[in-house]
Image (spheres, rainbow, N blue to C red):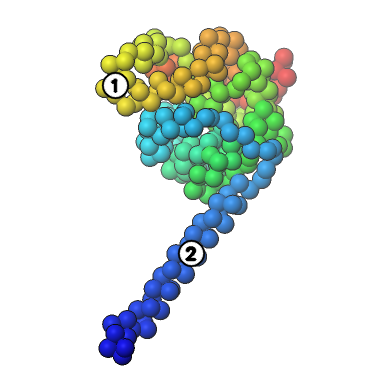
Amino acid sequence: MRGRKADFPGTRFDDLVMTVLTEVGRFENVRTMNQHRVVEHWVGSRECCDPAWEAAYARFETPEQEIAKFVRRLRGFGVETWNRDLTVVEIFCGRGSGLEAWRELGFRQLEGVDISESLLRQYRGEARLYLGDCRQLKFPDASRDVICVQGGLHHLPALPEDLRSTVEEVRRILKPGGRFVVVEPWPTPFLHLVHAACGQAWVRASSTKFEALSCMIEHERETYFNWLGKSREQWEVLSKGFQTETKRTSWGKLSWVGRKPAVTLPGAS
């Protein structure tokens, strides 16, 4: 027995025990961190997307690709010339890729709002998160410098009513001169071509990206085409009470920055 015991010295056993305990501790730390990831609950959690849509989105692009895309978009708006001390809120922030894009560009006062707690818990950054409905934000009046949404407004179920509620909340909490940054699908000729390509079986079979996009569109068909089919009406609601700083409609997207006037415009309320 002594000979066999020499093959399993106590130090090796102790090392094994310590390794196991360390890994358990790491797991508990991560679990605890994730439990406290959402720092404030404004509403009860609701799932915004079904599992099939989520799986398709994961096939469409990786988180790294999504962050890089958001960084390019923000640079296109010229945010690198903005003061890095601005307070920035991402509404419909989901997993937080937009928040990471702002962080990569040097902004640190970041907050995110989403209705899905499961999506918020996937975020690993340092922004402050809120589980909330973007139609009823809990921020004080005139308290934030920038509010950004990238691909969230077209998920609103009732248009234009829900859009009007969201925009009114954005206008309320922005400081005078604050910016509303919006990137949403828009019915451009390019988007019509994309839709046509998605309808072709051979295209879907030969391209993972087109297959995933087609699946995503199918699983959000009602809100997606409701948004696209009323683009003129959406624009009137979206831009009311803001001064347009940047507006582009190309490559299937509306890219717009509106500024809240320093003085309230007549009829803006």
**Amino acid, disc 2:** Val
* Label number found at residue 205: 1
Crowd class of label 2 (few under 14; some 14 to 19; many from 20; radius 10 Å): few
Q: Identify the element where label 1 is drawn.
A: helix
Picture residue at 49% right of the left edge, 59% below the top = 27
* Residue that badge 2 annotates: 24
* Label number found at residue 103: none
From this view, report whether residue 230 is shown above or below residue 253.
Answer: above
Picture residue at 53% right of the left edge, 36% below the top = 94
**Residue positioned most to the front:** 1
In-front residue for pair 250/125:
125
Residue 56 on image: x %, y %: 41, 29
Picture residue at 29% right of the left edge, 85% below the top = 4
Quarter location, residue 18: bottom left
In-front residue for pair 175/110:
110
From this view, report whether residue 8 is shown above or below residue 200.
Answer: below
Left or right, residue 116 beside residue 105? right
Q: Is the residue under label 2 in contact with that under label 1 (CB below 8 Å)?
A: no
